[in-house]
Image (cartoon, rainbow, N blue to C red):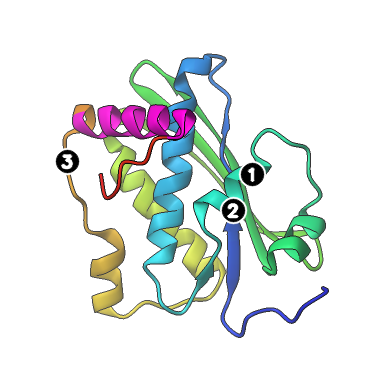
Amino acid sequence: MAFPLPEKPSITVFPFINMSGNPKQEYFSDGITEEIITGLSKVPRLFVIARNSTFTYKGKPVKVQQVAEDLDVRYVLEGSVRKSEDRVRITAQLIDALSGDHIWAERYDRNLKDIFALQDETTLKILQALQVNLSADEQYITYRKSTDNLEVYLTCLFMLYRASSSGQFLGNF
């Protein structure tokens, strides 16, 4: 590494790959990525690279060690999303960028209505793999939800995706 790593665990979350075969579902995989970044960012004992920095690597073949050095992180999370009607499959792998070893990997197959619980579970598993223990307050802050309505959530993801693609700024949407 060109620079010393932060003292606390440091991670970047690569944009999850849309494996659905439908380019119109790109907003969904981007939304999953963003939700995981947001969940991890709420933990003060974790250094998380911002979405805008991470998304510069979207769609590009990269070497984990090089990205880790470029962004000064120890861990990289990568994954994919497949959505088909009312089902979703998410795979995620946590990689130690210094060694290149996978330290955790998981595949989730769920009903789409369970997407919020799935995002929370994925974030918690990542924190466990990084050996970051959360206090009760940190758990509440990390996993509180803003909506339980899947239709509202998907509409928000789609609007955020369209706005980010067009360069518009939505503020705290």
Q: Earlier in the sequence, mark 1 or mark 3?
A: 1
Image position, residue 172 (x, y; %)? 27, 50
Q: Label 2, on which residue?
A: 53
- What residue lies at 37% left-to-right and 45% top-to-bottom? 118
Q: Label 1, on which residue?
A: 56
Count numbered badges in the picture.
3
Labelled disc at residue 18: none
Quadrant of image for the N terminus: bottom right
Q: Label 3, on which residue?
A: 148
The residue lying toward the viewer, choosing from 126 and 167, is 167
Distance (Cα) linking label 2 and label 3: 29 Å
- What residue lies at 16% left-to-right and 34% top-to-bottom? 149
The amino acid type found where label 2 is placed reads Ser
> Magenta stretch?
152-167
Q: Nearer the viewer, mark 1 or mark 3?
A: 1
Q: Quadrant of residue 7?
A: bottom right
The amino acid type found where label 1 is placed reads Thr
Callout 1 touching callout 2 (CB < 8 Å) = yes
Query: Farthest residue toward the bottom?
Result: 7
Q: Is residue 2 above or below residue 31?
A: below
Q: Earlier in the sequence, mark 2 or mark 3?
A: 2
Q: Is residue 24 above or below residue 47?
A: above
Image position, residue 84 (x, y; %)? 43, 17
Callout 1 touching callout 3 (CB < 8 Å) = no
Q: Is residue 34 visible?
A: yes
